[in-house]
Image: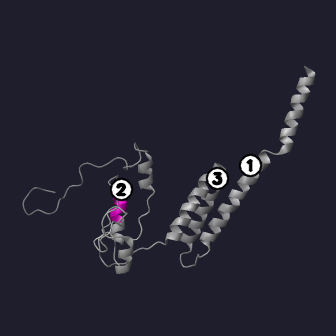
Amino acid sequence: MSTQRGNGSRTRAQKYKNTSVFKNDKYDKTPKNLQINRLQVVNVCEHCKGVIEWKIKYKKYKPLTAPAKCPKCLEKTVKHSYHTYCIPCAREAKMCPKCGKKTAIEEVEEDQTKLDNEMQQLLKTLPERKRRTFLRYLANKKKEISDEPDKKHEHVKDDLEAKLNELKLAANKEDDEDFSDDDFDSDLDDCDEEESED
């Protein structure tokens, strides 16, 4: 802005512009940073969610080292960074645990986050080919949902779980077929023939 007194608007464009987008994990691939990047911001109001996501995106997020004291129940139960109140007290008072305002709060069920974590763990156990198959299937499902927003998509989660289990079973079956007893017997026969020729 201009230093001229009373001039609150500037006519020229921004002088220095970034040529590339900031990546918070470009040089820092430590487990702590990767864990911070995987955080899901839940149980806070929309404004506070944006603030915390911004901190994570631009590497300003500082995790708590020890639980903080909740001013409502006076116990050390605040386990999330930048939160003032603990989750149970905030739910009881129907307010945001970060800012303390009584606004609409996006609540995600703990079962759903647990299920998402389980799906991530299952994905890690799959071979690369099956993992990519599942990710393509997931992208197609998301496209279907975005194409038909008025249609109810209640069974999507169940479909994804079924597909993931199907791929896992297929991967296990392929592993079993790769190491069948016939393969080992034929290899032993080949070794016996080579020894007899010598």
C-alpha separation, residue under disc 1 versus residue under disc 2:
41 Å
C-alpha separation, residue under disc 1 versus residue under disc 3:
11 Å
Tell which of 7 and 138 is nearer to you.
138
Query: Residue 131 at what x, y percent from top left?
Result: 62, 54
Badge 2: residue crowd in 10 Å (few <14, some 14–19, many ≥20): few
Comparing labels 1 and 2, the label whose residue is closer to the camera? 2
Query: Three-letter amino acid code at disc 2?
Result: Pro
Judged from this view, the residue extending furthest toward the left is: 5
- Label 3's element? loop
- Label 2's element? loop
Tell which of 108 and 5 is nearer to you.
108
Asked whether, in this view, residue 92 is left or right of residue 135, the answer is left
Q: Is residue 16 magenta?
A: no
Number of the label disc, if any, that sits on residue 63? 2
Q: Is residue 17 above or below residue 169?
A: above
Badge 3: residue crowd in 10 Å (few <14, some 14–19, many ≥20): some
Q: Name the residue: 34% across, 47% down.
A: 19
Query: Residue 21 at what x, y percent from top left?
Result: 37, 50
Coloring scheme of the render?
one colour
Q: Is residue 152 above or below residue 9?
A: below
Mark earlier in primary sequence (3, 2) = 2
- Label 1's element? helix
Q: Name the residue: 44% across, 51% down.
A: 34
Q: Name the residue: 56% across, 71% down.
A: 145
Q: Main secondary structure of the magenta part?
A: helix
Residue designated by label 3: 126
Number of the label disc, if any, that sits on residue 9? none
Residue designated by label 1: 175
Query: Three-letter amino acid code at disc 1?
Result: Asp
Mark earlier in primary sequence (1, 3) = 3
